[in-house]
Image (tube, rainbow, N blue to C red):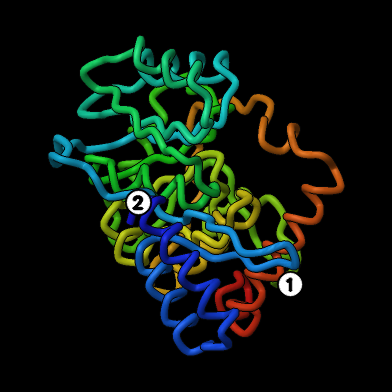
Amino acid sequence: MNREDAQRLLDERVERRRARDFEAADAIRRQLRDGGWDVVDSATGSELQAFRAPTDQATAPTTRAVTLLTVVHGWLPDIARWLLSVFTHTKGDFEAVVVDNSGDARIAGALVRRAAERLRVVTLDPPLGWAAAANAGVEAAGGEVIVLLDPGVELVGDAAAALVEALADPAVVLAGPFGLRGKGTMKEFAESAGPDVDAIEGYCMAFRRADVLAAEGFDPKFRFYRMADVELSFRLRARGGRAVVVDVPVERHEHRLWEATEPAERERLSRRNMYRFLDRWRDREDLLGGQ
């Protein structure tokens, strides 16, 4: 559903609420959600928030063995470094997919100028929350395996090869170099060298595209990135399978979304995401390693 149609329905919902026809208003809200739009009500009124990218992909992508995927929100030097590292070091049958979630015409123009056979760009207008943007990349990908990378992560070797090899084991549903295990509780996680872990961090996270689509992707309620990777890890593992740490040649640089968010705001958003995670998983301590 496009924004114009969504806005028309939102206006109709406002009228139904004024008339105290709450049943009709709730039906419109469900219709908007089916169309990819959340309604956020506040004291000043109601507004739309997109949580799913429009499905306007005209042709299916070329099938590849692996897609290296990143979601960008700006910072051209990081994008350039990421692309150079991917095309320098990745071997075999691969593609790179960049989801442009910046809302910045300069970023869009720079990515157009970098057009290449194995590079595809998904431009989101308007920008979405982090999880919804990542889902748009997963849906657009042609790879049987997807390696999701933060644009602040630089490949210094062929990282994809080892991750694809790990996922050749049907018992493995997630692989990556940065693992987490709960510290005896769902409320606190710490880095773990594995090999088996509770979750894989989204800095570098590999999974089968089909598995994530079957699990309905990242939860789009995670508009901020924190805990979205852990929540998906638990959802995939709850369906059966292991998350494993694989040592791959990558280097982490500055994480821009964290650094660009005011400390008080990132604490608020992180806390809200943790509560969202706990609401769903607090009773599944059987999914914590060692429990």
Which of the labelled discs sits on residue 2, or is there none?
Answer: 2
What residue appears at the point 42 percent right and 68 percent down from the top-left corner? 33
Q: Nearer the viewer, mark 2 or mark 1?
A: 2
Q: Is residue 290 above or below residue 56?
A: below
Secondary-structure class at tag 2: loop
Question: Residue at (41%, 67%) from the top-left corner?
Answer: 32
Sequence-wise first label, 2 or 1: 2
Q: Is residue 193 left or right of residue 158?
A: right
x and y percentages locating residue 136 in the rendered image: 37, 46
Residue at 76% of width from left, 61% of height from top?
271
Q: Is residue 271 left or right of residue 89?
A: right
- Badge 1 marks a residue whose secondary structure is loop
Q: Nearer the viewer, residue 21 or 254?
A: 21
Residue 233 visible here: no
Given the image, on which type of amino acid does mark 2 rest?
Asn
Question: Label 1: how many residues lie within 10 Å, few (<14), some (14-19) or many (20+)?
Answer: few
Quadrant of residue 111 within the rendered picture: top left
The answer to whether residue 250 is above or below residue 181 is: above
Q: Are marks 2 and 1 in contact (CB under 8 Å)?
A: no
Residue 89: quarter of image:
top left
Q: Which amino acid is tagged 1?
A: Gly
Considering depth in this image, is 244 or 37 the residue closer to the camera? 37
Cα gap from disc 2 to disc 1, whole angstroms: 45 Å
Q: Quadrant of the N terminus?
A: bottom left
In this view of the protein, which residue sits in the foreground, 96 or 91? 96
Which quadrant would residue 275 be assigned to in this image? bottom right
Q: Which residue in the structure is indicated by mark 1?
A: 184
Name the residue: 48% across, 65% down.
10
121 in relation to 217, above or below: above
Q: Residue 206 placed where, x, y %?
A: 41, 46
Tell me if I can see residue 86 in this picture. yes
